[in-house]
Image: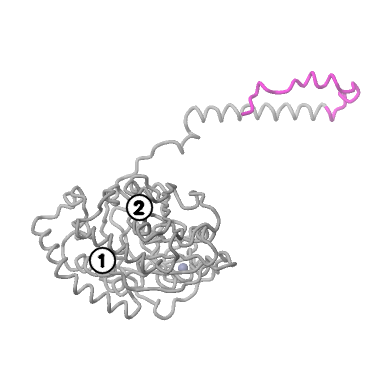
């Protein structure tokens, strides 16, 4: 930093110049002006030093305590239709949205883009606030997140999923699981003979990952410094909707995938029957964690703009869709706290105790779980037949030459199957 004491010695300099030049009026004026500027710089330097000492310029280093956020806050549908000005939509660039629902104790709202029907948390929170939405209990313990039987189902489901979606990849193919969490998918990949890599933001969450896998801990994918055209396939299983910049993430995936490489991703379906019928009670809204709620059309459009070609889109997921129906119906028609069944099936006894569920409520929820699952399964099969499943899984292919294209920022009118009623407009 420049100090006032470091001013050059003007008298010494002037002695080197010709006497007649030094006496000219213009030179004397320039000299006076130069001295004034240096004096001002010295004053400014002192001022900055003072601010530094007071910690005013070190605000980034200060630890700001974030208020604890409830894991399953209530979601209240808005009675009146309200238009809000937003940042340009990540899919279509439209700058306006419909406000759908408020979230208990939070300033963010659920809004739907007027141009393309993409659901968004508005405003998109900063990184520190997003982190506060994920308490340690959200990840569960490294070994098990759910009760033993449910945990068995989760692990068996991961194996089945990997086999079905990545099964045609040759043995030894290099596969990356973005947001690998406690490594359920990584273990399934390893067991099937693939070279498994994971990226995870949380060291605690990844603590239980299989040591045979390579796990990169990074605040986001772009900071994991992965090589160009390195992977044969990348999996984002219920991850893309949680990221503040899904377009940038897809651009990064395009860079690290080999030409023709496979992108396998799953997200909840904001245009599904369960979303449209259950509205603000829909389990997979999971507010405030997902920052985006895709429909088949918005997801395919974003993939295309990012240099991917959608090869298949499935509407049935055995683990997510029947449970989505069941928990949404319980949210809608019983007085139990939001997502109480999900909380009950968690391994974390602290979370169950904190939920305040009575013994009678717990018994009722367990009975509803086992008796209601077949019905919920049937509903899921029917909605999948109409291509309106509660969650959707996409297999897309990285284009060989085309990179991410520029978005069209002109809002478009949603048409066809995507023209949907708000999930939270009426109960
Ligand atoms: Zn949009």
- Tell whether position 160 is magenta: no
Magenta region, residue range = 1-27
SS assignment at label 1: helix
* Colour logic: one colour
Return the x and y of residue 215 as percentages of the image width and height: 41, 49
- Tell whether position 17 is magenta: yes
Q: Nearer the viewer, residue 111 or 165?
A: 165
Q: CA distance from mark 2 to mark 1?
A: 26 Å
Query: Where is 325 relative to 183, above or below?
Result: below
Seen in the image, is 322 located left or right of residue 288?
left
Mark 2 surroundings within 10 Å by alpha-carbon count, few (fewer than 14), some (14 through 19), many (20 or more): many
Foreground tag (2 vs 1): 2
Predominant SS of the magenta segment: helix
Quickly name the residue at label 2.
181
* x 43%, y 48%: residue: 216
* x 45%, y 51%: residue: 220
Query: Where is 396 relative to 180, above or below?
Result: below
Q: Quadrant of residue 422?
A: bottom left
Which numbered disc covers residue 281?
1
Return the x and y of residue 226 as percentages of the image width and height: 51, 52
Return the x and y of residue 243 as percentages of the image width and height: 42, 57
């Amino acid at each position: 930093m420049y100090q006032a004491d470091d001013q050059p010695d003007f008298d010494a300099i002037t002695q080197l110049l010709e006497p007649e030049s030094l006496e000219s009026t213009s030179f004397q004026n320039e000299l006076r002006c130069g001295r004034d500027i240096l004096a001002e710089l010295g004053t400014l330097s002192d001022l900055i030093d003072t601010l530094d000492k007071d910690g005013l310029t070190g605000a980034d280093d200060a630890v700001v305590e974030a208020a604890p956020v409830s894991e399953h806050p209530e979601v209240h549908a808005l009675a009146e239709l309200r238009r809000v000005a937003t940042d340009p939509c990540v899919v279509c660039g439209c700058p306006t949205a419909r406000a759908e629902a408020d979230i208990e104790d939070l300033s963010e709202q659920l809004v739907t883009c007027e141009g393309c029907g993409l659901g968004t948390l508005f405003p998109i929170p900063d990184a520190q606030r997003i982190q506060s939405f994920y308490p340690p209990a959200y990840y569960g313990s490294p070994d098990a997140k759910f009760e033993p039987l449910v945990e068995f189902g989760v692990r068996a489901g991961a194996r089945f999923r990997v086999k079905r979606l990545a099964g045609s990849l040759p043995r030894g193919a290099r596969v990356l699981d973005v947001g690998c969490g406690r490594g359920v998918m990584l273990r399934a990949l390893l067991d099937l003979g693939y070279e498994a890599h994971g990226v995870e933001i949380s060291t605690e969450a990844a603590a239980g990952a299989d040591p045979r896998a390579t796990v990169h801990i990074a605040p986001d994918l772009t900071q994991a410094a992965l090589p160009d055209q390195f992977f044969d396939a990348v999996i984002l299983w219920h991850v893309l909707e949680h990221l503040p910049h899904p377009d940038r993430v897809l651009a990064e995936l395009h860079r690290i995938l080999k030409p023709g490489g496979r992108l396998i991703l799953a997200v909840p379906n904001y245009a599904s029957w369960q979303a449209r019928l259950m509205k603000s009670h829909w389990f997979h809204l999971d507010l405030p964690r997902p920052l985006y709620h895709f429909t088949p059309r918005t997801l395919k459009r974003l993939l295309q703009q990012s240099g991917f070609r959608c090869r298949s889109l499935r509407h049935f997921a055995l683990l997510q869709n029947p449970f989505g129906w069941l928990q949404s119906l319980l949210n809608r028609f019983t007085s139990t706290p939001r997502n109480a069944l999900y909380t009950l099936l968690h391994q974390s006894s602290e979370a169950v105790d904190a939920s305040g569920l009575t013994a009678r409520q717990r018994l009722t929820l367990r009975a509803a779980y086992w008796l209601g699952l077949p019905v919920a399964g049937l509903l899921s099969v029917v909605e999948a037949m109409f291509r309106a499943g509660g969650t959707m899984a996409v297999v897309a292919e990285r284009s060989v030459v085309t990179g991410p294209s520029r978005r069209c920022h002109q809002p478009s009118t949603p048409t066809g199957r995507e023209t949907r009623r708000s999930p939270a407009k009426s109960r």
